[in-house]
């Protein structure tokens, strides 16, 4: 039994989320169009429309405990099709940011680790460095030899560069990281 | 021998794909009485009609059978063709070989055989048919409107606008109906009274509209074009000629705590009262049930203070008979008595109210002057739960959707936010039905802009705890049980026909549906007519509807009325029942079964053995008979026959079918 508070929107996290989205969550009328077209919904704890429903009821922490936003691949089919113009993908994005900051893996450690290593390599090298990403990701996820069989072939065909490429403006990338961590409104969710 | 022509229609492939047209034509041509038979792709088309006309003249036909669709579709078409050919239209019969044959059968041989049967039966019937002439009745150019709500007021105004005198009967002391008590109206939020009162004033000012307030229809005799209506004028105990509506009487009335019917008990009235300040007419009535004088013989305060001497305790109910040509029924609605639905604790918890009570509270001219307050302690509610579908869409109570509740609940949520800015509305609903111009947009405004919280599911339990009303229910969208600690609970209770509708249906001789709403003649094509000629419907008495729809139906009923009353006389179907007075025994079975009051008790004087004898017999009033045949079937002496459906015709028709049985026996 959920006791609905007098003002569920008083939840600060949800209020900030609505501010960032530019529309109240009540904009969603629960038609389910987002979930109907979601390619990842089958593996989510709750499909996208349920995620929004729980947020409408003020159950923010409960949503963070579910894996839905980690499984979301940001394909934006939901956002493109929403008849009420709800920023569904953006909602998932904001949840990921908050979960990442709090270190919540919500049953999807592998996804969480991938996000972490991806961002780390970009931060270190100014652009994506694939061998570094693979090694770090395998190391942190514990799947040490995952996908190693594909490495020789990819090297031979020139699909994998052994050393980080040049040309990235490292300083600019660092500024982006700094900005998003310290100043961007979305980072505050 | 009659000279009958048979015309068989393909109806494109509708009939021809299942029924062998040539075989039916061949068989028809061989039937007794038949002098000509043919078939055509579309008999109802212009060339098809010409085929019939030419054949009728060429073969000197005196009867026609058209084997085609249901007579409900094209009977008037082919009757007109018969008339043009100089044949009495009632000697044209349709054999239905589409709805009752080709559409419901697959086997060509069997369907063809059945079509031949149908043709054979109708030929036999036509051969026995008498020529009939339509009945003509003169029309009384005056209309009666029963019910002075918005639908009735609109109907009366429109009929009067057409130059026809209108009598508007209203059983409460003022016209205005439920709409007069509403606050703002969806979806535009314009003030209900502000848009209604000009119409009320127009109705009272119109020279062609006679207001009969505090009156009821007691009895209706006659039929379309000529109704005789008895109106009971309930005693007001106030001389309406002398009273100027100054209000001294109701201010001095010592008995002030009578729950006001107009306010649904939210406010009080005195024993002598006008229901609301803008009442039309602004003349008070004394409620005999609650007046102290009528109970104890003492008081007379109103009489003492009335400077014009208008109080008259000696008044009694009066009856007046009026003649009208048409009647518009606009008796409106009431709310379901939902005290039987225990889960809402209505009546047990004072802070559980109905939507109409909420309207009276939020209405600027209501008992709280527009302040929304908790009935229990008079404080402002901060959390209000609105419950949709209370008794509606529930097979234990009312199966139908009450239609207006979704929108008025959304409106209530918006009004709540406007009056109490920090209040929160929760609405338990099953579906939101917002079909109407600007309705969906209004609902979106309620939930997105005004922050109303919608919970999809029914309420399971309401109880009070620590000064709050706890509402438990289901949110099926999250799959969770939810509860709200509310200050006020507003029930959107099912709309039911106004009290007394059943009795009025009996008086008028019109039918009701299973829920007691008056039946329209056809749900799509005749939504304003009843099955009884000259009686029309407007507003919620036919089905739940909102203000725009009630107004539209009021105008539609007025238009139908004006159409009817614009004629000097009206034509009725001659297929009415006829009594043979020589064999009638006066058992009155026919009088008892007739839903239209057509059989009348009368007398005839006959000579038996040289002596004059007066006997009581039944006589059918042609103007009232709708040709349903109930009396014909009921008469134990078989002395009632129905024109167009006489025993001779029906037996001939059955005989036509039995021909097939006989033929089958002979071939065995």
Image (spheres, rainbow, N blue to C red):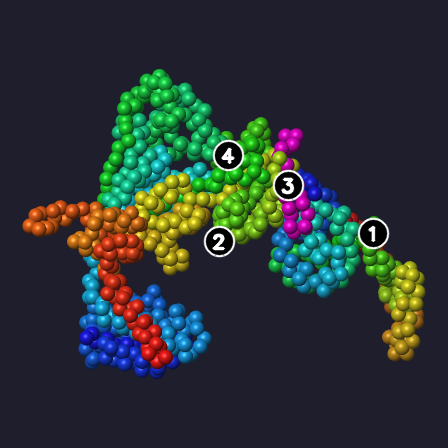
- Do marks 3 and 2 share a chain? yes
Q: Quadrant of the C terminus of chain B?
A: bottom left
Circle 4 chain: B
**Mark 4 packing: few (<14 Cα in 10 Å), some, or many (20+)?**
many
- Do marks 3 and 1 share a chain? no
Q: Quadrant of residue B93?
A: bottom left
Contact flag, marks 3 and 2 (Cβ < 8 Å):
no
- In the image, the segment drawn in magenta is B464-484
Q: Which residue was labeled with disc 3?
A: B472
Q: Quadrant of residue B387?
A: top right
Q: Which residue was labeled with disc 2?
A: B436
Q: Quadrant of the N terminus of chain B?
A: bottom left
Q: Which residue was labeled with disc 1?
A: A104
Q: Is residue B341 above or below residue B378?
A: below
Q: Which residue was labeled with disc 4?
A: B361
Contact flag, marks 4 and 1 (Cβ < 8 Å):
no
Which label belongs to residue B148?
Answer: none
Circle 3 chain: B
Measured Cα–Cα span from mark 3 to mark 2: 31 Å
Circle 1 chain: A
Q: Nearer the viewer, residue B515 or B433?
A: B515
Name, please, the residue furthest toward the front: B668
Residue B667 lies, in percent from the top left, at 35, 80
Measured Cα–Cα span from mark 1 to mark 2: 47 Å
| Secondary element at image label 4 | helix
Q: Earlier in the sequence, mark 2 or mark 4?
A: 4
Q: How many marks?
A: 4
């Amino acid at each position: 039994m959920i006791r609905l508070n007098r003002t569920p929107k008083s939840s600060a996290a949800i209020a900030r989320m609505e501010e960032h989205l530019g529309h109240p969550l009540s904009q969603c009328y629960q038609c389910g169009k987002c979930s109907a077209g979601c390619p990842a919904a089958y593996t989510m704890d709750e499909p996208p429309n349920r995620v929004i429903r729980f947020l409408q009821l003020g159950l923010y922490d409960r949503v963070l405990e579910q894996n839905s936003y980690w499984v979301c691949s940001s394909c934006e089919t939901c956002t493109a099709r929403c008849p009420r113009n709800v920023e569904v993908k953006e909602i998932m994005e904001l949840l990921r940011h908050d979960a990442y900051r709090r270190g919540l893996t919500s049953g999807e450690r592998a996804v969480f680790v991938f996000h972490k290593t991806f961002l780390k390599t970009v931060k270190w090298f100014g652009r994506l460095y694939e061998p570094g990403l693979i090694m770090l990701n395998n190391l942190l996820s514990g799947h040490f030899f995952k996908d190693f069989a594909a490495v020789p072939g990819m090297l031979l065909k020139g699909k994998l560069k052994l050393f980080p490429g040049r040309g990235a403006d490292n300083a600019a990338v660092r500024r982006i990281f700094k900005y998003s961590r310290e100043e961007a409104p979305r980072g505050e969710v | 021998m009659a000279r009958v022509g048979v015309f068989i229609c393909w109806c494109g492939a509708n009939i021809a794909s299942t029924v062998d047209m040539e075989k039916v034509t061949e068989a028809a041509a061989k039937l007794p009485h038949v002098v000509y038979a043919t078939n055509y792709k579309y008999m109802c088309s212009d060339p098809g009609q010409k085929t019939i006309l030419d054949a009728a003249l060429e073969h000197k036909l005196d009867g026609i059978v058209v084997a085609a669709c249901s007579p409900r579709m094209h009977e008037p078409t082919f009757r007109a063709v018969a008339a043009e050919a100089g044949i009495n239209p009632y000697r044209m019969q349709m054999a239905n070989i589409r709805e009752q044959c080709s559409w419901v059968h697959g086997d060509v041989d069997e369907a063809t055989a059945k079509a031949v049967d149908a043709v054979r039966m109708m030929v036999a019937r036509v051969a026995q048919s008498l020529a009939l002439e339509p009945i003509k009745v003169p029309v009384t150019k005056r209309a009666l409107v029963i019910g002075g709500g918005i639908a009735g007021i609109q109907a009366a105004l429109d009929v009067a606008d057409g130059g026809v005198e209108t009598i508007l009967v209203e059983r409460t002391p003022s016209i205005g109906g439920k709409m007069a008590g509403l606050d703002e109206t969806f979806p535009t939020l314009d003030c209900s009274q502000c848009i209604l009162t000009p119409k009320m004033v127009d109705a009272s000012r119109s020279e062609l509209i006679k207001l009969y307030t505090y009156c009821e229809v007691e009895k209706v005799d006659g039929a379309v074009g000529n109704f005789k209506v008895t109106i009971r004028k309930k005693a007001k105990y106030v001389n309406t000629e002398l009273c100027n509506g100054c209000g001294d009487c109701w201010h001095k009335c010592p008995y002030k705590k009578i729950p006001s019917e107009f306010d649904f008990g939210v406010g009080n009235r005195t024993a002598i009262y006008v229901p609301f300040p803008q009442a039309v007419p602004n003349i008070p009535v004394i409620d005999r049930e609650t007046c102290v004088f009528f109970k104890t013989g003492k008081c007379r305060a109103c009489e003492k203070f009335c400077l014009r001497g208008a109080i008259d305790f000696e008044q009694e109910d009066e009856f007046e008979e009026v003649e009208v040509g048409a009647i518009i029924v606009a008796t409106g609605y009431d709310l379901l008595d939902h005290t039987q639905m225990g889960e809402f604790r209505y009546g047990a918890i004072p802070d559980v109210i109905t939507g109409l009570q909420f309207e009276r509270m939020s209405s600027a001219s209501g008992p709280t002057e527009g302040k929304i307050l908790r009935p229990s302690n008079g404080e402002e509610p901060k959390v209000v739960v609105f419950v949709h579908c209370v008794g509606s869409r529930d097979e234990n109570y009312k199966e139908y959707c009450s239609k207006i509740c979704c929108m008025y609940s959304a409106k209530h949520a918006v009004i709540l936010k406007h009056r109490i800015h920090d209040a929160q509305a929760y609405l338990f609903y099953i579906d939101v039905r917002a079909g109407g111009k600007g309705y969906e947009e209004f609902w979106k405004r309620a939930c997105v802009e005004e922050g109303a919280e919608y919970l999809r599911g029914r309420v399971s339990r309401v109880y009070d705890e620590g000064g709050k009303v706890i509402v438990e229910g289901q949110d099926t969208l999250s799959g969770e049980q939810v509860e709200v600690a509310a200050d006020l609970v507003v029930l959107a209770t099912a709309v039911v026909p106004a009290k007394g509708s059943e009795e009025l249906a009996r008086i008028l001789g019109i039918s009701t549906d299973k829920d007691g709403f008056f039946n329209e003649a056809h749900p799509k094509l005749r939504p304003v007519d009843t099955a009884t000629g000259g009686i029309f419907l407007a507003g919620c008495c036919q089905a739940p509807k909102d203000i725009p729809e009630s107004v539209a139906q009021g105008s539609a009923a007025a238009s139908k009325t004006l159409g009817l009353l614009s004629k000097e006389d009206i034509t009725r179907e001659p297929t009415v029942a006829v009594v043979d007075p020589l064999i009638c025994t006066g058992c009155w079975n026919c009088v008892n079964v007739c839903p239209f009051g057509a059989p009348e008790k009368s007398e005839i004087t006959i000579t038996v053995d040289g002596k004059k004898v007066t006997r009581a017999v039944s006589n059918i009033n042609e103007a009232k008979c709708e040709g349903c045949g109930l009396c014909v079937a009921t008469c134990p002496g078989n002395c009632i026959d129905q024109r167009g459906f006489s025993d001779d015709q029906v037996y001939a028709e059955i005989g036509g079918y039995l021909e097939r049985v006989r033929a089958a026996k002979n071939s065995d």
